[in-house]
Amino acid sequence: MKLRDVKPNPLRVQRMLAMLKQAGVADEAVLRVMGLIPREVFVAPSMAVQAYDDLCLPIGEQQTISMPSVVATMTAALSLKGHEKVLEIGTGCGYQTAVLSKLCRRVYTIERHAPLSRVAVSRLHDLGVTNFTPMVGDGTLGWPEQAPFDAILVTAAGPHVPAALVDQMKPGGVMVIPVGPQETQQKLVKVTKDAHGAVQEQILGPVVFVPLIGAQGAMPTRARG
Ligand code: SAM
Protein backbone atom coordinates (compact mmCIF):
# COMPACT_ATOMS: atom_id res chain seq x y z
CA MET A 1 0.00 0.00 0.00
CA LYS A 2 1.22 3.51 -0.83
CA LEU A 3 1.72 5.89 2.11
CA ARG A 4 -0.88 8.29 0.69
CA ASP A 5 -3.49 5.49 0.93
CA VAL A 6 -2.87 4.94 4.66
CA LYS A 7 -5.87 6.16 6.65
CA PRO A 8 -5.42 6.99 10.34
CA ASN A 9 -7.04 4.46 12.69
CA PRO A 10 -10.41 6.15 13.48
CA LEU A 11 -10.54 5.09 17.15
CA ARG A 12 -6.98 6.22 17.89
CA VAL A 13 -7.59 9.50 16.08
CA GLN A 14 -10.80 10.13 18.03
CA ARG A 15 -8.95 9.48 21.28
CA MET A 16 -6.11 11.81 20.25
CA LEU A 17 -8.51 14.61 19.25
CA ALA A 18 -10.41 14.26 22.54
CA MET A 19 -7.11 14.45 24.41
CA LEU A 20 -6.07 17.57 22.44
CA LYS A 21 -9.37 19.33 23.24
CA GLN A 22 -8.97 18.33 26.89
CA ALA A 23 -5.47 19.86 26.78
CA GLY A 24 -7.03 23.16 25.66
CA VAL A 25 -6.45 23.05 21.88
CA ALA A 26 -9.49 24.77 20.38
CA ASP A 27 -8.24 25.62 16.86
CA GLU A 28 -10.64 23.67 14.60
CA ALA A 29 -8.35 23.83 11.54
CA VAL A 30 -5.41 22.36 13.47
CA LEU A 31 -7.62 19.61 14.94
CA ARG A 32 -9.06 18.79 11.49
CA VAL A 33 -5.62 18.52 9.88
CA MET A 34 -4.18 16.42 12.71
CA GLY A 35 -7.18 14.11 12.38
CA LEU A 36 -6.40 13.52 8.71
CA ILE A 37 -2.63 12.88 8.79
CA PRO A 38 -1.62 9.27 9.52
CA ARG A 39 0.88 9.77 12.37
CA GLU A 40 1.88 6.10 12.36
CA VAL A 41 3.78 6.47 9.06
CA PHE A 42 6.19 8.93 10.73
CA VAL A 43 7.47 6.39 13.29
CA ALA A 44 8.98 2.90 13.11
CA PRO A 45 6.37 0.14 12.55
CA SER A 46 7.13 -1.22 16.05
CA MET A 47 5.84 2.08 17.53
CA ALA A 48 2.78 2.48 15.29
CA VAL A 49 0.36 1.54 18.10
CA GLN A 50 1.68 4.42 20.22
CA ALA A 51 1.67 6.97 17.41
CA TYR A 52 -1.54 8.74 18.57
CA ASP A 53 -0.69 8.69 22.29
CA ASP A 54 0.55 11.92 23.85
CA LEU A 55 4.18 10.81 23.79
CA CYS A 56 7.38 11.83 22.07
CA LEU A 57 8.83 8.82 20.28
CA PRO A 58 12.35 8.18 18.92
CA ILE A 59 12.94 8.88 15.20
CA GLY A 60 16.71 8.20 14.98
CA GLU A 61 19.83 10.35 15.49
CA GLN A 62 18.76 10.64 19.18
CA GLN A 63 15.87 12.87 18.12
CA THR A 64 12.13 12.57 18.70
CA ILE A 65 8.75 13.27 17.11
CA SER A 66 7.05 15.80 19.39
CA MET A 67 3.95 14.92 21.43
CA PRO A 68 0.67 15.59 19.56
CA SER A 69 -0.40 18.10 22.25
CA VAL A 70 2.81 20.10 21.73
CA VAL A 71 2.52 19.99 17.91
CA ALA A 72 -1.09 21.19 18.18
CA THR A 73 -0.35 23.95 20.70
CA MET A 74 2.62 25.30 18.72
CA THR A 75 0.77 25.17 15.40
CA ALA A 76 -2.34 26.85 16.84
CA ALA A 77 -0.17 29.64 18.29
CA LEU A 78 0.86 30.61 14.73
CA SER A 79 -2.83 31.33 13.82
CA LEU A 80 -2.22 30.38 10.17
CA LYS A 81 -4.83 31.48 7.62
CA GLY A 82 -3.51 29.65 4.54
CA HIS A 83 -1.53 32.32 2.64
CA GLU A 84 1.65 32.21 4.75
CA LYS A 85 5.27 31.45 3.95
CA VAL A 86 6.44 29.45 6.98
CA LEU A 87 9.95 28.55 8.14
CA GLU A 88 10.27 25.39 10.25
CA ILE A 89 13.49 24.64 12.11
CA GLY A 90 13.89 20.92 12.85
CA THR A 91 12.26 18.82 10.12
CA GLY A 92 12.80 15.66 12.18
CA CYS A 93 10.50 12.95 10.83
CA GLY A 94 8.42 15.46 8.84
CA TYR A 95 5.16 15.20 10.84
CA GLN A 96 5.08 18.87 11.85
CA THR A 97 5.97 19.80 8.24
CA ALA A 98 2.96 17.80 7.04
CA VAL A 99 0.66 19.57 9.53
CA LEU A 100 1.96 23.01 8.53
CA SER A 101 1.74 22.19 4.81
CA LYS A 102 -2.04 21.80 5.09
CA LEU A 103 -2.44 25.17 6.83
CA CYS A 104 -0.18 27.56 4.88
CA ARG A 105 1.07 28.33 1.37
CA ARG A 106 4.58 26.89 1.62
CA VAL A 107 6.85 25.46 4.31
CA TYR A 108 10.63 25.98 4.21
CA THR A 109 12.05 23.35 6.56
CA ILE A 110 15.63 22.99 7.83
CA GLU A 111 17.13 19.91 9.54
CA ARG A 112 20.73 19.57 10.70
CA HIS A 113 20.82 15.76 10.38
CA ALA A 114 20.98 14.82 6.68
CA PRO A 115 19.69 11.23 7.21
CA LEU A 116 16.56 12.52 9.02
CA SER A 117 15.94 15.09 6.28
CA ARG A 118 16.32 12.45 3.54
CA VAL A 119 13.80 10.09 5.13
CA ALA A 120 11.35 12.90 5.94
CA VAL A 121 11.46 14.32 2.40
CA SER A 122 10.86 10.94 0.81
CA ARG A 123 8.00 10.21 3.26
CA LEU A 124 6.34 13.59 2.60
CA HIS A 125 6.58 13.05 -1.17
CA ASP A 126 5.05 9.57 -0.76
CA LEU A 127 2.21 11.19 1.20
CA GLY A 128 1.60 13.63 -1.66
CA VAL A 129 2.86 16.73 0.19
CA THR A 130 4.38 19.07 -2.40
CA ASN A 131 4.27 22.61 -0.93
CA PHE A 132 7.49 22.37 1.06
CA THR A 133 11.19 23.04 0.41
CA PRO A 134 13.74 21.18 2.54
CA MET A 135 17.31 22.12 3.42
CA VAL A 136 20.03 20.44 5.47
CA GLY A 137 21.87 22.97 7.61
CA ASP A 138 21.93 25.10 10.72
CA GLY A 139 18.43 26.46 11.25
CA THR A 140 19.57 28.92 13.95
CA LEU A 141 20.78 31.07 11.05
CA GLY A 142 17.42 30.85 9.31
CA TRP A 143 17.14 30.92 5.51
CA PRO A 144 18.16 34.47 4.46
CA GLU A 145 17.58 33.82 0.73
CA GLN A 146 13.92 33.00 1.41
CA ALA A 147 13.27 35.58 4.15
CA PRO A 148 11.13 37.27 5.31
CA PHE A 149 8.67 34.73 6.72
CA ASP A 150 5.11 35.23 7.94
CA ALA A 151 5.62 32.57 10.59
CA ILE A 152 8.55 30.64 12.08
CA LEU A 153 8.22 27.42 14.09
CA VAL A 154 11.27 26.08 15.94
CA THR A 155 10.96 22.50 17.19
CA ALA A 156 14.10 22.32 19.34
CA ALA A 157 15.04 24.39 22.41
CA GLY A 158 17.76 27.02 22.26
CA PRO A 159 19.36 28.98 25.10
CA HIS A 160 17.80 32.16 23.68
CA VAL A 161 15.76 33.32 20.67
CA PRO A 162 18.23 33.43 17.72
CA ALA A 163 18.61 37.02 16.47
CA ALA A 164 18.86 35.77 12.87
CA LEU A 165 15.35 34.32 13.14
CA VAL A 166 13.92 37.54 14.59
CA ASP A 167 15.53 39.45 11.69
CA GLN A 168 13.84 37.08 9.22
CA MET A 169 10.29 37.64 10.60
CA LYS A 170 8.00 39.82 8.47
CA PRO A 171 6.48 42.88 10.15
CA GLY A 172 3.25 41.42 11.54
CA GLY A 173 4.93 38.01 11.74
CA VAL A 174 4.99 35.43 14.51
CA MET A 175 7.50 32.88 15.79
CA VAL A 176 6.99 30.05 18.29
CA ILE A 177 10.12 28.63 19.91
CA PRO A 178 11.04 26.65 23.03
CA VAL A 179 13.71 28.50 25.02
CA GLY A 180 15.72 27.49 28.05
CA PRO A 181 18.50 25.35 29.45
CA GLN A 182 18.64 21.91 27.95
CA GLU A 183 15.71 19.66 29.06
CA THR A 184 15.00 21.63 32.24
CA GLN A 185 13.11 24.85 32.74
CA GLN A 186 12.29 25.33 29.07
CA LYS A 187 9.42 27.63 28.17
CA LEU A 188 7.45 27.89 24.97
CA VAL A 189 7.80 31.48 23.76
CA LYS A 190 5.64 33.28 21.21
CA VAL A 191 7.51 36.15 19.54
CA THR A 192 5.55 38.76 17.58
CA LYS A 193 6.85 41.59 15.41
CA ASP A 194 4.47 44.50 14.80
CA ALA A 195 4.10 46.58 11.64
CA HIS A 196 6.84 48.96 12.88
CA GLY A 197 9.28 46.12 13.64
CA ALA A 198 8.83 46.20 17.45
CA VAL A 199 9.27 42.73 18.96
CA GLN A 200 7.35 41.30 21.93
CA GLU A 201 7.63 37.96 23.72
CA GLN A 202 4.88 36.03 25.48
CA ILE A 203 5.46 32.84 27.49
CA LEU A 204 2.93 30.14 26.61
CA GLY A 205 3.99 27.51 29.18
CA PRO A 206 6.58 24.92 30.20
CA VAL A 207 7.88 22.38 27.64
CA VAL A 208 10.64 19.77 27.22
CA PHE A 209 12.50 19.67 23.89
CA VAL A 210 15.70 18.28 22.41
CA PRO A 211 18.42 20.96 22.08
CA LEU A 212 18.63 23.42 19.21
CA ILE A 213 22.24 22.95 18.13
CA GLY A 214 23.92 25.64 16.08
CA ALA A 215 25.77 28.92 15.74
CA GLN A 216 22.94 30.80 17.50
CA GLY A 217 21.82 27.82 19.61
CA ALA A 218 23.46 25.33 21.96
CA MET A 219 26.87 23.74 21.37
CA PRO A 220 26.97 20.09 20.23
CA THR A 221 27.61 17.79 23.24
CA ARG A 222 30.98 16.70 21.78
CA ALA A 223 32.20 20.29 21.86
CA ARG A 224 31.34 20.79 25.55
CA GLY A 225 34.12 20.36 28.11
N1 SAM B 1 9.19 18.75 13.93
C1 SAM B 1 9.78 17.48 14.19
C2 SAM B 1 8.92 16.31 13.88
O1 SAM B 1 7.72 16.49 13.60
O2 SAM B 1 9.46 15.22 13.89
C3 SAM B 1 10.32 17.44 15.59
C4 SAM B 1 11.75 17.09 15.56
S1 SAM B 1 12.71 17.08 16.99
C5 SAM B 1 11.75 17.46 18.38
C6 SAM B 1 13.74 18.53 16.72
C7 SAM B 1 14.59 18.47 15.48
O3 SAM B 1 15.37 19.68 15.43
C8 SAM B 1 15.59 17.33 15.46
O4 SAM B 1 15.39 16.57 14.29
C9 SAM B 1 16.96 18.01 15.45
O5 SAM B 1 17.94 17.34 14.70
C10 SAM B 1 16.60 19.35 14.83
N2 SAM B 1 17.55 20.42 15.08
C11 SAM B 1 18.21 20.76 16.23
N3 SAM B 1 19.00 21.85 16.03
C12 SAM B 1 18.82 22.22 14.73
C13 SAM B 1 19.33 23.28 13.92
N4 SAM B 1 20.18 24.19 14.38
N5 SAM B 1 18.93 23.35 12.64
C14 SAM B 1 18.05 22.45 12.13
N6 SAM B 1 17.53 21.43 12.85
C15 SAM B 1 17.90 21.32 14.13
Image (cartoon, rainbow, N blue to C red):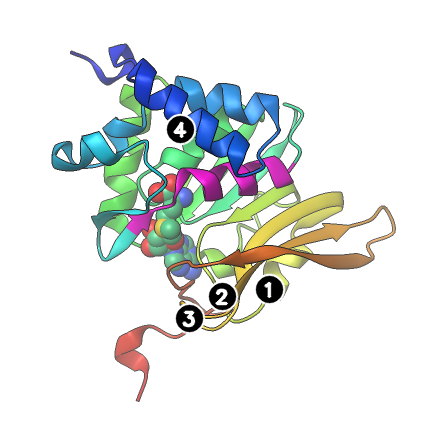
Residue at screen point 24% across, 35% down: 50
Mark 3, residues whose alpha carbon is within 10 Å: few (<14), some, or many (≥20)? some
Left or right: residue 103 versus residue 110 is right
Say whether disc 1 or disc 4 marks the residue closer to the N-terminus: 4
Mark 2, residues whose alpha carbon is within 10 Å: few (<14), some, or many (≥20)? many
- Helix, strand or loop at label 1? It is loop
**In-front residue for pair 134/23:** 23
Quadrant where the image shows the C terminus? bottom left
In space, the residues marked 1 and 4 are separated at their CA atoms by 31 Å
Tell me the number on the disc at residue 182: 3
Rendered image quadrant of residue 51: top left
**Residue under pointer 1:** 161
Rendered image quadrant of residue 184: bottom left
Quadrant where the image shows the N terminus? top left
Percent x, y for residue 29?
58, 22
**Residue under pointer 2:** 158
Between label 1 and label 4, give the one nearer the viewer: 4
Say whether disc 3 or disc 4 marks the residue closer to the N-terminus: 4
**Residue under pointer 4:** 16
Q: Amino acid at mark 1?
A: Val
Percent x, y for residue 104?
58, 26
Say whether disc 2 or disc 4 marks the residue closer to the N-terminus: 4
